[in-house]
Image (spheres, rainbow, N blue to C red):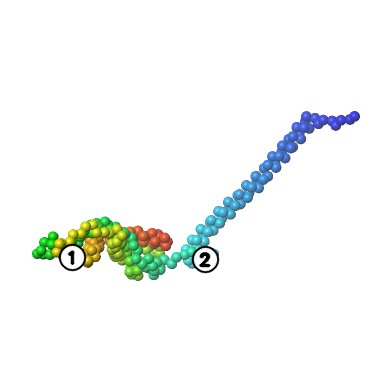
Amino acid sequence: MSTDPKPSSTERARQEAVARQQRIAYKERPRSRAGAILLGLLLFFIVGVGAAVYLLRQAGMGNGIAAKLAGILLSGRTTFNTSAPNVVNQIQRLNRLETVSYSVDTVVEGKHTNAVLPDLLFGDRLLLVVHGQVIAGVDMSKLKPESVHVDGRTVMVDLPASEVFTTHIDSGKTRVFARTTGLLTPADPNLESDTRKTAETQILQAATNDGILDAARANARGSMESLLRGLGFTTVTVR
């Protein structure tokens, strides 16, 4: 019976070297292809970004063939008309911009007295626990066109005067704390309503003394600055 001769050690070494080289070549080919693809994508991205920057600059210059081409290609961009009439319209649409709400709890006295006769017999007096609210702001509908100045991306706005919009007594939180009526006089049915009116006046005066109008204007300025910057202005002055 015959047997195949075994390869010599030199032949085995040569075969192993060839197999090792084939494995190395097999592993390196995909890596080289992937590297080429990544390099191509990177170059495409760099060229695309450069072209976009160039087109944006040309569109902003507004003249020349390149500028016209950039305008056509970028015609789908969202733009905003920053002319003074457009800004005035945007601000006036806010109407009454309420920027401060001032709340106060106080006790107000209301009374009817007789200049001659004692209150024990003819007086009428009550103490009213009042919860009130004062709301102030700026009425933007009063903004005049000449109060807005636009120069490119720079805008200056002179706001209308701040004002009190409402002074309100919360009936649900307002109550009569105490009332005394003279022995010889009937209770005045209008005394409580008259005292409420007095309370409104006192609450408004307290809010004014605490600077509600100044606070309303300062808050309105902050709101306007945010609005104008949102419209695309880079230099904003609100007075």
Q: Secondary structure at mark 2?
A: loop
Query: Image point 40% across, 60% down: which residue?
Result: 229
Tell me which amino acid carries mark 1: Pro
- Mark before the other along the chain sequence, 1 or 2: 2
Quarter holding the C terminus? bottom left
Q: Are marks 1 and 2 in contact (CB under 8 Å)?
A: no
Assign a secondary structure to mark 1.
loop
| Residue 148 visible within the image | no
- Which image quarter is the N terminus in? top right
Q: Residues within 10 Å of mark 2 (few under 14, many from 20)?
A: few
> Disc 1 marks which residue?
186
Res. 97 visible in picture: yes
Dot 1 alpha-carbon crowd within 10 angstroms: few under 14, some 14 to 19, many 20 or more = few
Which residue lies under the disc numbered 2? 75
The x, y position of residue 146, in whole percent, is 33, 69
In this rendering, position of residue 159 left or right of residue 209: right
Viewer-closest of 200 and 173: 173
Q: Quadrant of residue 97?
A: bottom left
